[in-house]
Amino acid sequence: MFSKETYIQRRATLRNKIGSGLILIPGNHESPMNYTDNTYHFRQDSTFLYYFGLDLPGMFGVIDVDNNLDLIYANDVDIEDIIWMGPQKSVAEQAFAVGVDVSAPLEKLGQTVERAIKAGKRVHFTPPYRAENQIQLSNILGIKVSNIKQYASLVLIQAIVSMRSIKDAAEIAEIELACDTGYEMHITAMKMAHPGTMEQQIAGTLEGIALSKGTGTSFPIILTQNGETLHNHNHSFPLEAGRLMIVDAGAESNGHYASDFTRTIPVGGKFSQKQKDIYNIVLAANNKAFSLTKPGVTYQSVHLQAARVIASGLKELGLMKGDVDESVANGAHALFFPHGLGHMMGLDVHDMEDYGQIHVGYDNEIRPIDQFGTAYLRLGRRLQPGFVITNEPGIYFIPALIEKWEKEGINKDFINFDKAKSYLGFGGIRLEDNVLVTETGARLLGKRIPINPEEVEGVVAGH
């Protein structure tokens, strides 16, 4: 939790941006695994954390713009709770710690909202992503659960995105902590990448590191030798010599800020020449993208430049053919690079995407490109100082996709399908760093995890 003044100032800024009405910011509730008292690890809603800072279930924040008033609705614990949890601060005490002077039991929330509606005030809320909050909003607003998201406030979404997109020094420090843990996780994975080791053993070890240094992983760990599946969460295989292991994993700090790194590791510690050729293309795309990252540049243009590096490299290896710029314009590179270059990162590993990715990654100037592969680019708009983003190009050989494109003749003028089929079973390579956009350019967040092939080989070998 940051200082009381931080939360007071954030809410004041939001009130000024909205101008009038009532802003509803529900916190999250406990979520049962298999019965009521056996719950998943609690994760507070990020919007609630940003404006109210309290990391406890069953809380609801309200910002009354017209009356310049902030309120927290929550229930104090009773004696049965105290028996199991120990003494707890009152809701009033917790609210005071984040600069909120008015608190009340949850049962009073509906009355507050009803009075606002009767007074003709506009009620603002962001799209709820959890069923409990959808039901709660449905009950207090009188809107069918199925229609709740349609009534989300675009004005509020745009105001929050404008604030949360720019990370301040305290937020960057939290992300750096998550990056430090991410570094340790990935170095550990490299050291464990030996034939016979189970993927599950490595994934479990990484998760333990994340839990020992913060609140856990920032997303379910992706760790696999079958790297052609972009988000492969299956950890059921023993490592085999000569294969490539993709590790896409990040940590969450105690303040709930995320890191998100990817490295690709040769099992046993030695890249084959074929693997190194593809790896170096991805590394060149990563380095090119980082060199282009600076304020005023659209990340869509950076993505396309990374795609050109990939297409050019694959052409040199005989996997692609024809004019490089024309092949990228036609989306031919997406056979091998079928995703976007990166996304926003902060309190969420894909920051603020619960508001709708179109509102976070794009704006009225920069719109998504409706083309396979590039359409998956989550962040396209102009970069600003204070943005924290990921840079994660990759090359993959996906049997079903190669078969489909060859059968349908998709981009046949730019793809050497016979050569591509000789890479079936190769897997995939992705290399991801976390980047802060600065006033003059960009800098990597955290110590850079070994990325040059010789560095990676050295770590696996224990050098």
Image: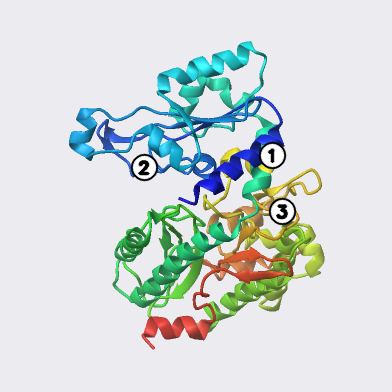
Is residue 87 left or right of 304 when viewed as pictured? left
Question: Which residue bears the numbered disc 1?
Answer: 158
- Whether residue 185 appears in this view of the structure is yes
Question: Which residue bears the numbered disc 3?
Answer: 380
Amino acid marked by disc 2: Phe
**Residue 335: x percent and y percent?**
64, 59
Q: Which residue lies furthest to the top in this view?
A: 118
**Residue 339: x percent and y percent?**
62, 56
Callouts 3 and 2 close, C-beta under 8 Å: no
Disc 1 to disc 2, C-alpha distance: 27 Å
Amino acid marked by disc 3: Gly
Q: Nearer the viewer, residue 438 or 134?
A: 438
- Residue at image position (59%, 80%) is 277
Label 3 or label 2, whichever comes before in sequence order: 2
- Residue at image position (68%, 75%) is 313
**Residue 13: x percent and y percent?**
66, 41
Of the numbered discs in the image, which one, if any, rests on residue 444? none
Callouts 1 and 2 close, C-beta under 8 Å: no
Q: What element does badge 3 sit on?
A: loop
- Whether residue 319 appears in this view of the structure is no
Question: Which residue bears the numbered disc 2?
Answer: 42
User: Alpha-carbon neighbours of circle 2 within 10 Å: few (<14), some, or many (≥20)?
Assistant: some
- Residue at image position (27%, 34%) is 34
Q: What element does badge 1 sit on?
A: helix
Q: Which of 407 and 255 is in front in this view?
A: 255
**What count of labels does the image hold?**
3
- Residue at image position (72%, 58%) is 384
The correct choice, above or below, for 298 with respect to 244 in the image is: above
The correct choice, above or below, for 394 with respect to 219 in the image is: below
Disc 3 to disc 2, C-alpha distance: 32 Å
Label 3 or label 1, whichever comes before in sequence order: 1
